[in-house]
Image: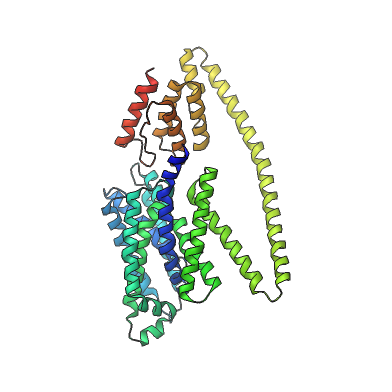
Amino acid sequence: MNEASLLQLMLPSFCLCLLMVGMLSYLGIHVIKREIIFVDLALAQIAALGALIGFLLGIPLYTQASYGFSLALTAMAAAVFTLSRSRRSPVPQEAIIGLVYAIAAAVAILLIDKAPHGAEHIKDVLTGSILWVKWRTVGTVAAVYAAVGLFHLIFHKPFLWITRDPEEAEARGVKVRLWDFLFYFSFGLVITVSVGSAGVLMVFVFLVAPAVMAVMLTDRWLYQMAFGWALGFVATAGGLMLSYLGDLSSGPVVIGSYAVVLLIVGAIIHVVRAEERARALRQTLTVGSAFALCLAGLLLVGRVVGSHMRGRARHEHAAALASSVHERAGKAPAAAGETTTGLDTAADPGEQADAVCRALDRDPAAGAKLALQYLKENPPPYFAQQVVDKLDSLLPQPSGFDVAESFSAAVNQKAAARVRANLMKR
């Protein structure tokens, strides 16, 4: 994939990440001040569960009906969280939120087994695929965020009062339970449209990390939002750039960049606010160096052990392959050739993708057959794209494969037909 196509691929992801930084940083400050940190995970799991239930009832994923089903279940969870909030209750609200998350996750696991050929789709709902987001999804998210943002802007006072001190808000005549429900419902609406593309973990990081850094830096609300947006932008842009330069998956790299920025901000605050800054700086550098050495040692040991185990596994696999070839020595050479060039089902998707690309270099016709076999298994989009790029380099025109869709989709069936016509019938 050339530089222009890579930038074109990542631009929708970058725009979606910036939208999420703006919206979730604001909501994250509310969440931290309300001390309901894991409400995002709970609502995200509820939204995913709603999509799964709708899928089992015949509602296709990523449709308006599927989002509506998720939103309905999220509204029910918002009502539960609203009713469970009470300063006089002996049970903290965070315990209720944790239980809701655990129950929703358990039910989802039970239902996934009942989903016909739906495990991969449900996995996408739970983990997201930020790199393969399309402009229409960005537009939908932007519209929802704009509506929720306008709603919070118009009614910012009751939301702010309840977040800071619900008892004082109630004394001012604010209907706390009503506005609590509206907060959770609008929050759930944002989560519902975000988690399908970004995944539960990435949405959680976008919600909490910028808000944590902002709260550490200042106590003033407007400054907190400004710091959250600025630091979130830096972490997001840096993570996406690193994923582009290193040809890595965008979601994990962006999350990792947030971790780095959070550590740097925490270290700077610790040194600046210390009474003896020189001593604090030495302590910070010492602790950082110790952790770096421990991590480097662990990685070195892991690499040595992993290399040894991979070598043993390759030896065992080669022995098994040699035995298989020996048993089939009496068969036709073509059959033996198929055995030596077939996909290793024990290998991970990345190793399989590399094997397919090498096969395409050696023999485009046989490699194309192997590539279609690989793509038919619906591997992770990142590795599938590697194989598609290799196929496209051998074709007079791009095949048109869309790795965000299943192999059985119409667009990919047409692409497979082009591959067969151009490579396998030579």
Residue 394: percent from the left, percent from the top?
43, 26
In the rendered image of this protein, does residue 20 appear above or below residue 372?
below
Residue extending farthest bottom: 171
| Quadrant of the snapshot with the C terminus | top left
Q: Residue at the location (40% across, 26% down)?
A: 395
In this view, the residue in front, 131 or 335, is 131
Residue 409 drawn at (x, y percent): 31, 37
* Residue drawn at 73 percent across, 70 percent down: 278
Q: Quadrant of residue 263?
A: bottom right
Position of residue 312 measured from the top left corner of the image (x, y, whole percent): 64, 33
- Closer to the camera in the image, 411 or 106: 411
Q: Is residue 139 left or right of residue 299?
A: left
Q: How is the image coloured?
A: rainbow
Residue positioned 40% across, 45% down in the render:
132
Q: Is 250 placed above or below 99 here?
A: above
The answer to whether residue 33 is above or below residue 410 is below
Whether residue 346 is visible here, answered yes or no, is no
